Amino acid sequence: MFENKKILILGMARSGYEAAKLLIKKNNKVILNDIKDEQLQNYDQVQELKKLGVELIFGSHPDDLLDSSFDYVIKNPGIAIDHKYVIEAKNLNIEVINEVEMTYRMLPPDIKLIGITGTNGKTTTTTLTYLILKEAFKDKVHLTGNIGYPFCSCLKDLKENDIVVMEVSCQQSENIKKFKPNIGVFTNISEAHIDFMKTFDHYKETKSRMFYNQEENDIAIINIENNEVLKTLDRIKSKVKYFSSENEINGCYIKDKAIYYYDEKVIDISHIKIPGKHNLENCMAAIMVAKEFNVENEIIDKVLSEFTGVEHRLEYVDTVNGISYYNDTEATNIKCSQIALSSFDKDITIILGGLERNQNFYDLVPYMNNVKNIVGIGECRQRVKEFGDSLNIPTYIYEKLEDGFKKCVEITKTGGIVLLSPASASWDQYKECEIRGTEFKKYVKDIKEKEKENEN
């Protein structure tokens, strides 16, 4: 299928690099094009691709690059859906797919594929699912997808009857045609990524595409409390199973401070360390996948009781001088910050702001009951100030996180929480939001070390 072809890979990053390595070894003519200059690319990766024979074009998207001689365009998930090459490829009847779709078409038989998507919670759910299955089945389980490991990078390691656990983003879903998981999980859906997906309807349709491809023998695991998910998936063919954090249902649910699976008690909620109702939903989704593989409750309990969270997602950092610090830098939209705020019943100083996306901070109002201070940072900090002032909550604004953090330490009282949950992307100042979170954690570490010095 992908042999002896001429293929344009649009965009480098992790998936473009891995796809190029794979395709060049199958006697394809591979051209990789990325808008960033060569000196901004990973040097070792560039040299490796050159040695393999990949033709690299960096720094621009030449108007005359794409023509009818190409068989495929493999689009990096981060490339805009209306990029000129995407439009031209369609005019030339060249199939545009991404690395996820490409890899799916190359999967060996008898692989069990678990695809996990949703606006929020998909990384935690993917991680929990992987850890539970890994504990049960050891090296037969592989982690891949939007969680940081391109799908095609695990191809070489797959053996018969292996299990692949994959986080699937909306960007990865955009150019899939045949891709479908044996078990699909939809955590929830709310308005997000509209700058990329253009409309909420398109976002919902794209997120749901892998479920539309499922067949009667496949399984869809769905949050029954999310009406948008139910409406979007009302026409799928697969067998649907539900979880609920609100009601006892025919599926996975909460009763008597425990999680039940079809009337079987699986784990006491007190054993679960990650805070918030949303995380109980993530746990239930992971439990439902595990039960499809007949994983014993003892294994599920062991993994869930040891799990303390995914880095940068409502991550507990430390407690210093009676103040607890939480890094939720991955909260790049309002919904994520709503979830974070609803997870605590203590006084909160929240850090909001970042890239200006005209996000509506007023959607946070119902969740602000415990917020005693607001610190605004980044490009949209002035709108954060206007928001805080309208609620009569003391609000302080700074361009840089470092200055905002210092203010948090100064104004937060003992017993309170400092919560970095910006409701904003980080691209006004950072290449990626993880860098923002790592910086926050460094500042926490610094004040703890300073406190130790003072004690000595």
Image: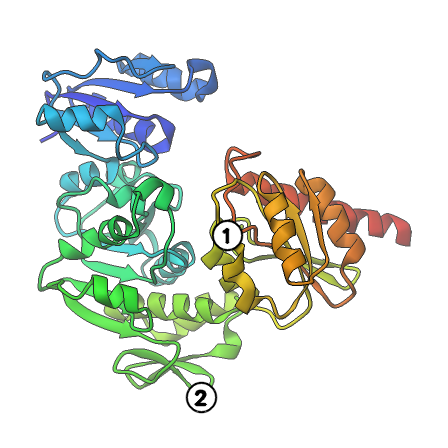
Residue 399 seen in this snapshot: yes
For this rendering, which residue is in front, 365 or 71?
365
Mark 1: secondary structure? loop
Residue 249 x %, y %? 29, 83
Q: Which dot, 1 or 2, sits closer to the camera?
A: 1
* First of labels 1, 2 by sequence position: 2
Query: Dot 1, how many residues are within 10 Å of its Cα: few (below 14), some (14-19), or many (20+)?
Result: many
For this rendering, which residue is in front, 36 or 193?
193
For this rendering, which residue is in front, 113 or 223?
223
Distance (Cα) linking label 1 and label 2: 31 Å
Give the residue displayed 40% in from the left and 42% down from the top: 148
Residue 254 x %, y %? 40, 81
Give the residue displayed 90% in from the left and 50% down from the top: 454
Residue 307 x %, y %? 50, 63
Residue receiving disc 1:
331
- Quadrant location, the N terminus: top left
- Residue 147 located left or right of residue 319: left
Name the residue type under label 2. Asp
The answer to whether residue 379 is above or below residue 126 is above
The answer to whether residue 94 is above or below residue 444 is above
Residue 26 x %, y %? 16, 24
Name the residue type under label 1. Ala
Mark 2: secondary structure? loop
Residue 419 seen in this snapshot: no
The answer to whether residue 397 is above or below residue 284 is above
Q: Quadrant of residue 89?
A: top left
Colour mode of the rendering:
rainbow
- Residue 39 located left or right of residue 35: right
- Count of numbered marks: 2
Residue receiving disc 2:
256
